[in-house]
Amino acid sequence: MYQLTLPDKSVKKVALGFTYRDFIEKELPFLKNKALAVRLNGTEILDLSRTVEADANVEVLTYSEKAGWDTFQHSAAHLLGMAVQNLYKNANLTVGPVIENGPGFFYYDIDFQGEIVTPEDFPKIEAEMEKIVKADHSVWRKVVPKKEAIETFQKLGEKYKIEIIGGIPSEDVSIYGMGEWFDLCRGPHVPNSGVLKSFKLTAISGAYWKADKDNAMLTRIYGVAFPSKKELDAYLFQIEEAKKRDHRKIGKEMDLFSFQKEGPGFPFWHPKGTILWNSLADYLRSECNKRGYQEIKTPAVLSSELWKKSGHWDNFHENMYFTDIDEEDYALKPMNCPGCSLIYKHHLHSYRELPLRFAEFGSVHRHELHGVLHGLFRVRAFTQDDSHIYAPLDHLESEVMDIIDFTFTVYKKFGFSEFKTFIATRPEKSQGKDEDWEFATDTLKQSLEKKEFPTESKKERERSTDRRSNSTSRIRSEDFGSAERSR
C-alpha cells in the first residue's frame, strides 16, 4: 500500500498496481471528468495512466490550473500532428510546444515536403481532428531505448525526430500515441483524445528549423483548445472584437505609420503618427523632469570592443547589426546601457551627487527573424524610454520604490488600473556576482511588499490558476517602459 497526501492534508491509501486515474475514480470521483494529470511533491507532473509507485503529496490538475492547461494544449498539438499526418502522408513533424504569447495557445512546426498548406486547408484539418476526438482514443505511453526509437523513426523517414533524439542525454526516450499513431514526447498528456472537445486552428506562418535561417523553412500552424464549445466561442468572440482594435488596422486607417519593403521590421512614422509619438515623449519627459532625471543622448553606433566588455557581444551577438568603420568593427546599439555608462565615467563623481538619474529616449536596433515580425509589437528598431540610476546601495530600496511609483503612474495614465506583478530573477545570460543579484532581487521584493503590491515569482507564475483570465494587465519588470530603471 502507498499513501497519497492531498492538498488539504488528508491521507489516502492506494493499493499496489493502482494508476492515478484509478485513485481519482475511487477517492475523488467528483474530479474524474475534469482531471488531466497529477503533480507529485510540487514538481513532477505525470499522466493519469501512470502507476502509483511511492508515497507522495499529490495534486490533481484540471484545466483551471496552469500545469493542467499546459497539458491540455500540448495534447491538442499532438491532435493536430496526428490529423496532419493522416491527411499528408509525407509530412514530417518537428516540435509542438505550448506558448504564452502568439496567435494561439500551441503550435506545431511541420515540414510538408514541398506541399503548400494555407489557411484554406484549416477546415479539412479540423474535420480530421474532430474525427480523432470522436474516436476517443486512449493516450498511451511507452519508454524505449534511444537506439530503438531512432530505428523506428528512420523507417518512417522522420529525420527531425532522429535529430531531436540525438540531443537527449538520457539512454531512454518516451513515446506517446493515440491508436496506431505516435510521436516522440516527454509528456504529460491528457488521458484520451475525447477530452479535447473544442479547438480552432488560428494562424499559419513560416519558421526555420531551430530558428536558424540556414535550416529548412517549416510551416507553423497555431491553434487553441478548450474543454467546451461555450468557452471556445467566447474566446473567438473576444478575438474578433480585438481585431477591430488591432493597432495595425488602426495605424493604416488613420495614416499613423507603415512598413516598407525597403526596411522590413523598421517602422516609418507618418506626420500624424509622429504627432502622437512626440506627445507621448513629451509626457514622459515631463514626468522624468519632475523626478530629477537628466536627459542624455548617446550614439547609435559604438565600437564592438564596448559590446564585448558589456557582455552583449557574447550573449546577444546574433541579435545585433554590425558594420566596419576605418577597418574596425562597430555595432548598432541594441541597448542604451553601455553608452550611458560611458557618460557616467567621463567625470569623477562625489557621493554628494548621488543618486544620479539619467534618462534617454534611445533608438535601439535588434535583429528579429522575418517570420516573427508583428506590427509595432515585434520590430527591428524601436525607442526605449530608458533610464539609468547611479546610487549608493543604501539608497537602492528608496530608488526602487520611486521607480515603482513612476511606473504605475504612467500605466494608470493610460487606463491600466489593475496589475499583477511578477519578480523576474537572474536570467541565464547575465553578468555579475550571485550575491549582487540576490541583493538586488531581495530589494525589489521588499520594495513591492512595502508598496503592498502582491507578487509572484517565476515559479509561482507557472503554477498560476488564472491562466485564461485576461481581465488583468500583468505587469512584469521586463514589461516596464524601461527595464533599466530597476538596475
Image: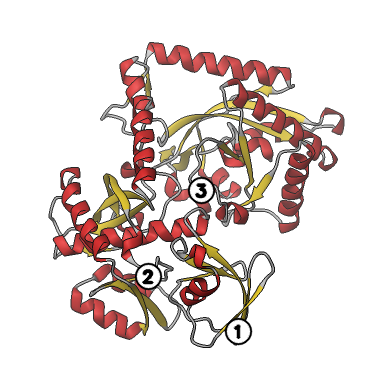
| Count of numbered badges drawn on the protein | 3
Q: CA distance from mark 2 to mark 1?
A: 28 Å
Q: Residue at x 87, y 29 (%)?
A: 352
Q: Mark 2 touching mark 3, by CB under 8 A?
A: no
The residue carrying pointer 2 sits among few (fewer than 14), some (14 to 19) or many (20 or more) residues within 10 Å by Cα, namely: some
- Per the image, label 1 sits on a secondary structure element best described as strand
Q: Residue at x 25, y 76 (%)?
A: 153
Q: Mark 1 touching mark 3, by CB under 8 A?
A: no
What is the three-letter code of the residue carrying label 3?
A: Arg
Q: Which residue is more in the foreground, 413 or 369?
A: 413
Residue behind mark 2: 185
Q: Which residue is more in the foreground, 185 or 316?
A: 185
Q: Position of residue 132 (x, y in %)?
A: 24, 62
Above/below status of 387 relative to 310: above
Above/below status of 251 relative to 427: above
**Whether residue 304 is visible:** yes
- Per the image, label 2 sits on a secondary structure element best described as loop
Query: Which mark, by number, is residue 87?
Result: none
Residue behind mark 1: 2
Q: CA distance from mark 2 to mark 3?
A: 23 Å
Q: Is residue 30 left or right of residue 215?
A: right
The answer to which of marks 2 and 1 sits earlier in the sequence is: 1
Q: Position of residue 242 (x, y in %)?
A: 38, 30
The answer to which of marks 1 and 3 sits earlier in the sequence is: 1
Query: Which mark, by number, is residue 467?
Result: 3
Q: Is residue 10 left or right of residue 210?
A: right
Q: Position of residue 335 (x, y in %)?
A: 54, 38
What is the three-letter code of the residue carrying label 2?
A: Cys
Q: Is residue 4 left or right of residue 244?
A: right
Q: CA distance from mark 1 to mark 3?
A: 33 Å
Above/below status of 216 relative to 15: above
Please identify the quadrant where the N terminus is shown: bottom right
